[in-house]
Image (cartoon, grey):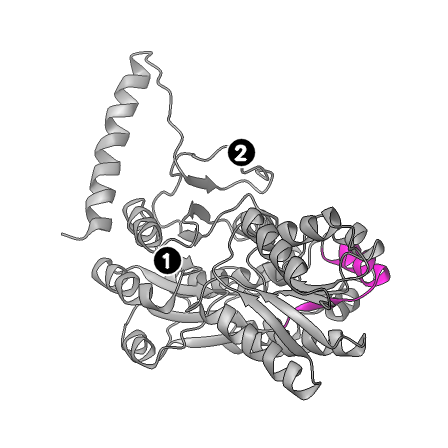
Amino acid sequence: MLLKSKNRLFALLLAMVMALLCFAGCTGGGTATDAATSTDAAADSTDTAAATDTSTGDRIKIGVSIWGYTDALGKDVYDFLTYVSAAIDCDVEFVAQNFDTEATISSIENLITSGCDAIIVCNSSDGVMPKILKLCEDNEVYVAQFFRVISDPEVLEYANSCKYFLGCTHEDEVSTGYNLGKALADKGIENTAIVSWNHGDPTAEDRYTGYMKAFEEFNIQVLAEQWEINAAEEGAKAAENFIAAYPELQSIVVTGGSGEPLAGTLSAIENRNMVGNIHVVSTDFLPTLRDDMDTGKISAMSGGHWADPFFSFMLAYNVASGGWQLDEPTEIVMDMVYVASVEDVDNYEKWFMGEIPPYTTEEIQALCVSTNPSVTLDDLKAAASTLSLEDVMARHQDMM
């Protein structure tokens, strides 16, 4: 019998037992795990790591397997998807896996067991996808990627043969790296060093490819590079080593990693009194972005892509609810928001992070088959491809 079916039978029996206990006047406490479930748009805190499965009847439940949801980028994803789930009246559950392969597989198993109809995942590597896909196929649970696209030809061939694989949402990462590399060239940079997270991660590799394309075109020399950097402490150590080894160092590229490697890199530069002397470009906005840009710690950044999982979430919901049927997995591509000045950051904070989110409740419902049966996959793709600071300012100019 399927895990999902077993779980629903167990949930029914458990509900009957709990009802009898409540009738008898008994109460009980819960224990914290690494999962978070939300059906309330006001639930914007990730301090509590566990909540009760509230899915009932035909109500759709979407699982989110994510590296974490307390860092800068992860919390933006958590907050927005919580808001989205309330807008379309569905349940959402988050499980943190820290980009660990075994933890990622475990997160998928846990979400299946909890009764999810579909799962969106930010996977640690292409290599983990076959196991994820098999779990979802065996249990008839839809799955889509976010922040990721499969690059390995064999894995992609297998994924495309899976009935329950919906596809992915991702940024044009080569373009991201190229644009930020060009930003360094525009500032006259002639040499740099690179801090990146894991080899084998498609996003990291593609972004690196874009940087190298720009560096070759604009004659920027890469003095050194350090990979497998996933934490602030690791980023700080790498930057310290670069600064000590290369007196001629003019810039450091931090390819990403959810903000932690960047925070460490900036701390090391500040500790060495090199702010303004070493230019930094990166991806994944930190909460300190405005101050970092104002003081010269940051020269250019790309980010704002926390909306990426929204499109995979809507794809998963629209299929799992029975509104859409896909002939084959789909690929949704979006661009990032680029900032290179305090003015850019102020506009981003106002139009993306202010009182009105990039998509209002009504705009979200317009992309949902339950509230707008005529919405198509092309509509969802168009929304993703046009999302930008300028797009949001145009759509919401009469709301501010």
For the residue pair 291 and 334, the one nearer the viewer reads as 291
For the residue pair 189 and 90, the one nearer the viewer reads as 189
Q: Residue at x 50, y 67 (%)?
A: 373
SS class, disc 2 = loop
SS class, disc 1 = strand
For the residue pair 397 and 95, the one nearer the viewer reads as 95
For the residue pair 400 and 385, the one nearer the viewer reads as 385
Looking at the image, which residue sits at the far top?
25
Within-10-Å neighbours for mark 1: few <14, some 14–19, many 20+: many
Gap between marks 1 and 2, in whole Å? Answer: 25 Å
Where residue 308 appears, as percent x and y from the top left, is: 56, 64
Where residue 223 appears, as percent x and y from the top left, is: 62, 72
Of badges 1 and 2, the one in the foreground is: 2
The image's mark for residue 339 is none
Q: Is residue 190 placed above or below 267 in the rendered structure?
A: below
Residue 260 seen anywhere in this rendered image of the structure? no
Residue 348 belongs to magenta span: yes
The residues colored magenta run 335-352
Where residue 243 appears, as percent x and y from the top left, is: 67, 59
Instruction: Give residue 200's quadrant in the image.
Output: bottom left
Q: Is residue 155 placed above or below 106 in the rendered structure?
A: below
Q: Residue at x 21, y 38 (%)?
A: 10
Q: Quadrant of the C terminus?
A: bottom right
Instruction: Give residue 280's quadrant in the image.
Output: bottom right
Instruction: Give residue 339's quadrant in the image.
Output: bottom right
Q: Identify residue type, mark 2.
A: Asp
Where is mark 2, residue-wise? 47
Where is mark 1, residue-wise? 118
Within-10-Å neighbours for mark 2: few <14, some 14–19, many 20+: few
Considering only order in the chain, which callout, 2 or 1, is on the residue closer to the N terminus?
2
Where residue 368 appears, as percent x and y from the top left, is: 52, 62
